[in-house]
Image (cartoon, helix red, strand yellow):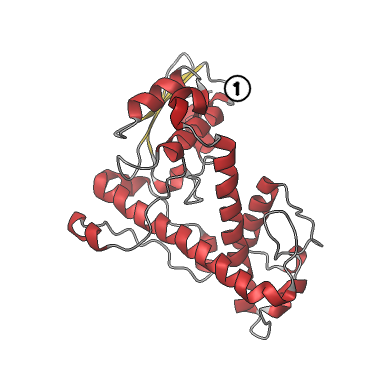
């Protein structure tokens, strides 16, 4: 395999690594700064984040997932993942190099297990994906009411990117993905009672708006911190447009305006 082909394979592997809160691939977000493939099968990847103070546990999770995805490639002999310009870069990079794991890297600061953190955000991603898919359905069927959604099954959703995204989120949680499975369920797969549907939808919409707002905000911050990163960012996925959400336009964020922004900051779950 040529060096160029290996680089493409490495970037494809990184496409499977998601920011846990923003629920987008780190490649689309522009978090992959560089990929270098050595002739001996060594692979070095540099990651960058929107700020130096992004939550350390999020940063570690993305860096660790990147190393796992790259190590799984059959041709790699040595994988080095480096997080640049973060206040915990040295700590995280040492932990990754030593394969120390999350608790081995952060010690007593690692109060919550990494898998528990991952599960929290998989549940949030599922809630947002469910709301997007149902929003597409409601828009395409104006006579459908929110109460009617109680009986909607996966096979009744439009053949759309938002539906495919919902199926991926359900599979990640171990929820059913059969066409006969109900769409509107909680994180354990339990169907919501009909009387709770409007309230549950409002909550799901709030979760989705929070995720989308943070994604837009972080993209702008990254472009402000690293102007060259704009070329590495991909337009937001088609499912956002299908659900009626604004697609990121690529503007930068003026540093002087940051004090006035009200979009929620990245949550620090430790």
Quadrant where the image shows the N terminus: top right
Residue at horizontal 53 percent and vertical 20 percent from the top = 76
Q: Residue furthest top?
A: 40
Relative to residue 82, is residue 130 drawn left or right?
right
User: Looking at the image, is 246 positioned above or below residue 122?
Assistant: below
Relative to residue 177, is residue 123 drawn left or right?
left
Residue 238 location, x and y as percent?
A: 52, 61
Q: Residue furthest left?
A: 256
User: Looking at the image, is 144 positioned above or below residue 55?
Assistant: below
Residue 127 location, x and y as percent?
A: 60, 59
Label 1 Cα neighbours within 10 Å, binned few <14 / some 14-19 / many ≥20: few
The quadrant in which residue 155 appears is: bottom right
Q: Residue furthest bottom?
A: 143
User: Looking at the image, is 267 positioned above or below residue 111?
Assistant: below
Which residue is tagged 1? Answer: 74
The quadrant in which residue 162 appears is: bottom right
């Amino acid at each position: 395999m040529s060096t160029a082909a290996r680089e493409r394979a490495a970037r494809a592997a990184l496409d499977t690594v998601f920011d846990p809160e923003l629920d987008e691939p780190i490649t689309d977000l522009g978090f992959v700064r560089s990929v270098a493939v050595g002739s001996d099968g060594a692979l070095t990847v540099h990651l960058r984040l929107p700020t130096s103070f992004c939550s350390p546990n999020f940063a570690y999770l993305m860096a660790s997932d990147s190393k796992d995805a790259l190590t799984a490639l059959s041709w790699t002999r040595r994988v080095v993942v480096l997080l640049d310009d973060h206040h915990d870069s040295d700590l995280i990079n040492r932990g990754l190099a030593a394969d120390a794991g999350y608790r081995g890297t952060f010690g007593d600061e690692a109060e919550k297990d990494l898998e528990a953190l991952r599960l929290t955000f998989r549940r949030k991603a599922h809630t947002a994906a469910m709301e997007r898919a149902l929003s597409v359905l409601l828009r395409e069927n104006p006579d459908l009411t929110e109460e009617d959604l109680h009986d909607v099954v996966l096979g009744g959703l439009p053949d759309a990117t938002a539906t495919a995204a919902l199926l991926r989120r359900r599979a990640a949680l171990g929820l059913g993905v059969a066409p006969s499975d109900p769409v509107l369920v909680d994180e354990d797969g339990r169907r919501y009672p009909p009387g709770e549907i409007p309230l549950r939808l409002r909550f799901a919409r709030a979760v989705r708006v929070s995720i989308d707002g943070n994604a837009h905000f972080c993209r702008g911050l990254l472009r402000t911190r690293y102007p060259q990163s704009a070329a590495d960012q991909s337009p937001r996925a088609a499912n956002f447009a299908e659900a009626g959400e604004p697609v990121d336009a690529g503007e930068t964020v003026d540093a002087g305006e940051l004090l006035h922004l009200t979009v929620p900051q990245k949550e620090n779950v430790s």
